[in-house]
Amino acid sequence: MSAAQQTIQVGGEWRPAVSGATRDIIDPVDADVFAVVSEGGVADTDDAVAAARAAFDDGVWPRTPVAERAALLRRVAALLERDREKIGALESRDAGKTLEEGRVDVDCVRDAFVYFADLVMNESGGRVVDAGNDEIHSVVVHEPVGVCALITPWNYPLLQASWKIAPALAAGNTFVVKPSEITPLSTVALIGLLMEAGLPQGAANIVTGAGDTVGARLAEHPDVDLVSFTGGLASGTKVARAAADTVKKVALELGGKNPNVVFADACATDEGFDTAVDQALNAAFIHSGQVCSAGSRLIVEESLRERFVAELARRAERIRLGRGTDPGVECGPLVSARQLARTEDYVASALAEGAVLRAGGERPDGPGYFYRPTVLDRCDRRMRVVREEVFGPVLTVETFRTEDEAVTLANDTEYGLAGAVWTADAGRARRVAGRLRHGTIWINDFHPYLPQAEWGGFGKSGTGRELGPTGLAEYREAKHIYQNLAPRPVRWFAG
Ligand code: NAD
């Protein structure tokens, strides 16, 4: 076990928690402690917010020319490339993902920094409004919001942090980030890279610690102007409530219960069938299903069900579990004992409600928080496992007979993050995509996202968007400047 690392940074200085508290970081593969970090509290949070406030109100970052801000973001991207192996391995160990997934995450983080650098460099810098009078000059400009509180989850620790940090900095804000207490290490490393790239002290601060102390304090803090939260529905609603008293801007990226709709015509050829099954596996089981956009609800045309589910179950049973850095391993463990227990509970409740187990449904022998990829057939939308987000390797199967029924099923969720439709009929694909109430729709694909396209949810999957131009706009206030070039009395009042 390593000595305690100082993982709180306030105003450019790394330090331990004011209370001296620490937290063990657990390797989910064997449940061993592999790092010890500072466990911040309210006092650390207040210090970090004060540093971010001073850096915003009196510091240089919000007043730094956009070209220099963009150049800094590009330097961070280059440093991420330099440290790809190191940070990818850290993410793999901390979050229990394969090394290759860890590397891909670092590449995606790099791409987010490059995207937002390019975006701010290509803006016009304000919109002139025609006031209908040559003596009026009217322009709308976009300014940074101020101090941003960025709260992130454990499944994609660095990626989710970068979708907030890169646009927040590109827009000229300062911030305090609070990574998940389970997986803080890669975000700590990223703050180090921001400093190395030359970000002024106080512009980026990090407090490692628990949600109900550090996170809750950030959400309610009067000196925080915006809180951007990614995590579960229960914590997200608490954040929104805590933020309400100070009327700060709130962006929530919450959970999902994402339908993967497969029409029989998509599987008319062997190649089509193989692709749809393969992608359904990937949709549900990558990162052991701990993905907000996991395709955890397979909604398949009734005539195709038996053949599709049999092949899916056969391939699910063959997924190789293990330590993400070991050769040949395809899937890691769940992130924690809690997440494992939650998954077991959902599977037990599904079986009690009449689901039919076709694959998995148990933990393998040995240490760590592993759970076998699980396929539950003959599910229906009244079951808890179909309605609630499991966040584990559990795929439920429902069936439909008509296009209308497929759409009704796919929209019957309180969430609305993402969904997919598989069909060989281009007209049907666009029709169904148009009717699905989810923030991202894939047609004949699952999971890809683009930094230049907005990401976020309908319904209880959240408010606001990350990525794309909207992902930058979240970190800005619009200001209308109306200049009268020839002022004279208006004579509204006669006296
Ligand atoms: P979580 O809600 O338990 O925790 C998320 C973060 O919020 C953590 O940093 C946690 O410490 C903090 N937190 C907890 N309680 C808080 C409170 N009262 N006030 C302020 N902060 C608090 O979520 P998790 O288990 O870490 O992550 C899994 C969830 O995240 C899933 O629901 C998943 O769908 C969601 N998620 C969504 C997206 C998206 O883009 N929509 C992406 C990734 C994950």
Image (tube, rainbow, N blue to C red):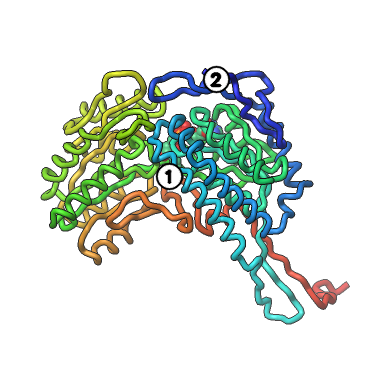
The disc at residue 2 is 2
Instruction: Check the image and name the residue furthest to the right.
Output: 495
- Relative to residue 251, is residue 99 drawn left or right? left
| Residue at mark 1 to residue at mark 2: CA–CA distance | 27 Å
Q: Is residue 219 above or below residue 345?
A: below
Q: Is residue 243 left or right of residue 426?
A: right
Of the pair 296 and 225, the residue shown nearer to us = 296
Tell me which residue sits at (29%, 47%) in the image: 259
Q: Picture coordinates of residue 327 (x, y %)?
A: 33, 33
Q: Secondary structure at mark 2?
A: loop
Mark 1 close to ligand 1, CB under 8 Å: no
Q: Residues within 10 Å of mark 1 (few under 14, many from 20)?
A: some
Secondary structure of residue under mark 1: helix
Q: Residue furthest bottom?
A: 134
**Amino acid on which disc 1 is placed:** Val
| Ligand 1 closer than 8 Å to label 2 CB | no
The x, y position of residue 215, in whole percent, is 58, 32
Asked if 346 appears above or below 85 in the picture, the reply is above
The number of callouts visible is: 2
- Residue 250 at what x, y percent from top left? 57, 45
Camera-side residue: 4 or 49?
4
The quarter of the picture where residue 375 lies is top left
Q: Does the image show residue 234?
A: no
Which residue position is annotated with label 1?
104
Q: Position of residue 276 (x, y in %)?
A: 22, 50
Residue at 18 percent across and 46 percent down: it is 399
Tell me which amino acid carries mark 2: Ser
Residue 58 in the image: above or below residue 141 = above
Relative to the observer, which residue lies in front, 195 or 141? 195
The residue depicted at 35 percent of the width and 55 percent of the height is: 441
